[in-house]
Amino acid sequence: MFFPFVAVILFHLLGEWKFRFCTCYIRIMNNLGAIDLNLLVVLDALLAERHVSRAALRLNKSQPAVSHALARLRALFDDPLLVRHGGQLEPTVRALEIAPQLAEALAQMRQLMGAQPFDPAREPHVFRLAMSDYAALVLLPQLMATLRRRAPNVDLIVSQASREVMMAQAIDGEIDLALGVFPTLAEDLRTSLLFEEHFACLADAASLGVKKTLDLPAYLQRPHVLVSLRGDTGNEIDLALAAAGHKRRIALALPHWSAAPGLVLGTDLVLTVARRILPRDGEAGPLTIFAPPFAIPPFAFRQIWHRRRDGDPAHRWLRDLIAGVLAPPTAAPAAV
């Protein structure tokens, strides 16, 4: 008799749990029905951009429409969500709690519904990129030529900062993409390798004489130009020399990659820099390009972005475009 009695109790409890579950589910669905889910898309953009105007550009909406949506969101969550601090909006504690869950939910929803592809030929879009002078020299000429042909309504806003600041800007949503050398990354940042860069030396051809190169003793006797944002010697070149027990004299330290090659002309200076900013072989004129007389490890040049932008079709399109622009040219097939 004991077992039938227990079965009746379990059936009753399960029935009560099922009733409560259904009631809770109906309440949740009714609440969702009262919410304009487009508001969550606006909130995601505001948390990423932390700026009403930039969020409006991203969403292709007017600034008043985004401001009105933010007011509705504040009422919906009973929280300010974003408060003005200095020149931008700072998320509240509640907003920081919401952000990763919201981004994940919207990413899954876009995947479920099938995100609309970005049409660069017709859709207007503004991207904010951060990069060094070197990256601008290597990337922007080809990238802008490609954009003008294939995406005439896409605009770029480019800024420059140290790698630490660029990573912080990507995390805070101030930029869409950063390009540079990033040995370590924060957990929420994504990265893709664009290419590996090697070093080369540049000197005035007349100062080199007939040899057109320098051995290590001659290299160390010369004064050098250093390209560095901070003017220090914590770079790949000087670290490689230090590892071999050597040190060079820096006669000029400057932060401008583009100006450095022209400073060598008519002097005994030597410039050791990334190969891609130097003229192509046969185009150096009165300057001579030669290999460094010691081993310098190459560096990885990358693009980085926050994981919240992984599923953004426009952002993915730009990442792929940049990778294609910087890819080495494919050798033409040999004639048969």
Image (cartoon, rainbow, N blue to C red):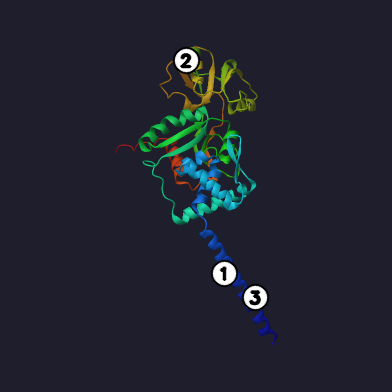
Residue 22, numbered label? 1
Q: Pinpoint residue 271: horizontal percent, then vertical percent.
A: 53, 20
Q: Pinpoint residue 275: horizontal percent, then vertical percent.
A: 49, 27
Q: Quadrant of the N terminus?
A: bottom right
Where does residue 112 sit, x and y in percent of width and height? 47, 57
Taking the spot 39% from the left edge, 37% from the top edge, the residue there is: 153
Q: Is residue 66 left or right of residue 121?
A: right
Between label 1 and label 2, give the one nearer the viewer: 1
Secondary element at tag 1: helix
213 lies left or right of 97 = left
Q: Residue furthest right?
A: 2
* Secondary structure type for disc 3: helix
Percent position of residue 252, x then y? 58, 17
Name the residue tied to disc 3: 13
Q: Is residue 282 left or right of residue 40?
A: left
Q: Which residue is mark 2?
A: 205
Earlier residue among tags 3 and 1: 3
Amino acid type, callout 2 = Ala
Tags 1 and 2 touching, CB below 8 Å:
no
| Quadrant in the picture for residue 255 | top right
